[in-house]
Image: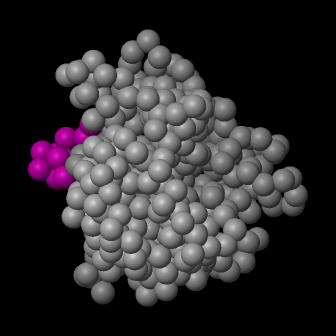
């Protein structure tokens, strides 16, 4: 097997929660050596998503999924020795990534300006919620705040309801932006020898997705509102009930040809000639009546059966899959999207892999590490500390493998 695409690249990962760790898990899957840095004083707060019980910080499913392909060390960066060791690790790393508020790295005295003195060609990603400059640069927040402030939530919800929480969509979107930026910066460094600081604003990563609503306001002064499951142009466009309890099918029609194909597929070809639905503007204006007619057909079918019928007719349709059904879905099984990984505390479980397939360099999957699991490897093998020195660090609580208190980082 060929070498992994990023083999030989070392990433020092200070990021927490989901956005940064999603980025580094992806890059770890591509072969980068990712060293996750936490502390026993304040571990990644994303570990604490389960009720409190023995080893609960190792058991949270989303944390385990988001931190595959990594090594874990602990360092207390509030102590000079911890900072000293972190700087030593940076000196042999290619990338540093963090997603704290802007004041955190300043308080540690570990800003890019400081770290580039140690490693001049260092690539550093800082991904605070609102960017490193501007009036809001010191504001803290999580995905729900970013999604609202970026403008996405205002467009999400039903016409007669409030803006809706997107459920954390911000984090993986930001993570992918950061991963792309790192790859570009690595290529730039390969060509020029230059490192650089990458400022990733989480709200800007989301706002840039609002292309059409922003352009419509800029050109026409129209402010988009909430449309529920409907579309500004396409009709029918929505989610329709199928046979069974809480079973649904999504359908989207963008042309008269697709509309005629839908009418044929549901056994009601004369519907295409109904004046209320004969053109796209007419269908859009009469969606309430149209949705009722389509639902009469979908209610007679299983969602996957209906999807297959419509797809064969050339209609864009997709079953609304519940999480418990995905593991058994034949399509995912054939593509081996879910992979078994075994890990202490949680045992053997199926984990989602990556939506990419490299023909010559398959992406890898390694279980998420336990807290401080690789202290000896990183500090001893990579940084050259003796066993006595490592023991002294443990005795001084600069490193460890057990949290000193149940709580997380307040970024």
Q: Which of 12/62 is in front?
A: 62
Q: Which of 263/310 is in front?
A: 263
Q: Position of residue 362 (x, y in %)?
A: 34, 78
Residue drawn at point x = 47 percent, y = 63 percent: 294
Q: Does the magenta-highlighted stretch encompass residue 264?
A: no
Q: Is residue 271 left or right of residue 343?
A: left
When asked about the image quadrant of residue 344, the answer is: bottom right
- Furthest residue toward right: 53
Image color mode? one colour
Residue drawn at point x = 40 percent, y = 53 percent: 237
Range of residues picked out in magenta: 187-199
Is any atom of residue 55 visible in this view? yes
The answer to whether residue 101 is above or below residue 265 is above
Q: Which of 359/193 is in front?
A: 359
Quarter of the image containing the C terminus?
top right
Quarter of the image containing the N terminus?
bottom left
Is any atom of residue 391 visible in this view? no
The answer to whether residue 24 is above or below residue 170 is below
The answer to whether residue 14 is above or below residue 359 is above
Q: Is residue 293 left or right of residue 246?
A: left
Q: Position of residue 38 (x, y in %)?
A: 62, 47
Residue drawn at point x = 27 percent, y = 49 percent: 280
Residue drawn at point x = 33 percent, y = 35 percent: 210
When asked about the image quadrant of residue 143, the answer is: top right
Q: Is residue 182 left or right of residue 16?
A: left
The answer to whether residue 340 is above or below residue 240 is below
Q: Position of residue 29 (x, y in %)?
A: 41, 67
Q: How many marks can you see?
A: 0
Q: Does the magenta-highlighted stretch encompass residue 191?
A: yes
């Amino acid at each position: 097997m060929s070498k992994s695409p990023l083999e030989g690249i070392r990433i020092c990962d200070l990021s927490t929660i989901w956005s940064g760790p999603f980025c580094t898990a992806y890059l770890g899957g591509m072969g980068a050596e990712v060293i996750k840095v936490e502390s026993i004083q304040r571990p990644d707060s994303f570990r604490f998503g389960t009720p409190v019980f023995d080893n609960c910080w190792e058991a949270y499913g989303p944390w385990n999924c988001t931190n595959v392909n990594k090594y874990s060390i602990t360092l207390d960066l509030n102590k000079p020795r911890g900072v000293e060791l972190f700087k030593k690790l940076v000196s042999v790393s290619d990338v540093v990534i963090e997603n704290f508020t802007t004041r955190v790295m300043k308080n540690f005295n570990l800003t890019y300006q400081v770290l580039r003195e140690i490693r001049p060609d260092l690539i550093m990603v800082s991904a605070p919620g609102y960017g490193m400059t501007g009036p809001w640069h010191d504001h803290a927040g999580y995905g729900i705040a970013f999604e609202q402030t970026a403008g996405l939530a205002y467009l999400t919800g039903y016409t007669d309801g409030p803006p809706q929480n997107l459920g954390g969509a911000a984090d993986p979107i930001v993570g992918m932006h950061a991963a792309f930026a790192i790859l570009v910066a690595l290529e730039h460094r390969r060509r020029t020898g230059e490192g650089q600081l990458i400022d990733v604003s989480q709200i800007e990563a989301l706002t840039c997705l609002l292309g059409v609503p922003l352009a419509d306001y800029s050109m026409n002064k129209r402010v988009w509102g909430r449309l529920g499951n409907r579309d500004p142009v396409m009709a029918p466009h929505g989610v329709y009930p199928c046979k069974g309890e809480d079973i649904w099918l999504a359908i989207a029609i963008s042309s008269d040809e697709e509309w005629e194909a839908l009418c044929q597929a549901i056994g009601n070809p004369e519907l295409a000639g109904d004046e209320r639905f004969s053109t796209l503007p007419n269908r859009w204006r009469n969606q309430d009546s149209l949705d009722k007619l389509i639902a009469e057909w979908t209610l007679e079918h299983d969602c996957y059966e209906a999807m297959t019928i419509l797809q064969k007719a050339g209609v864009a349709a997709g079953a609304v899959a519940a999480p418990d059904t995905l593991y058994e879905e034949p399509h995912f099984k054939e593509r081996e999207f879910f992979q078994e990984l075994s890990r202490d505390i949680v045992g053997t479980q199926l984990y989602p892999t990556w939506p990419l397939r490299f023909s010559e360099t398959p992406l890898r999957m390694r279980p998420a590490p336990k807290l401080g699991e690789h202290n000896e490897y990183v500090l001893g093998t990579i940084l050259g500390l003796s066993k006595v020195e490592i023991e002294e660090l443990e005795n001084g609580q600069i490193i460890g493998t057990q949290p000193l208190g149940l709580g997380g980082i307040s970024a």
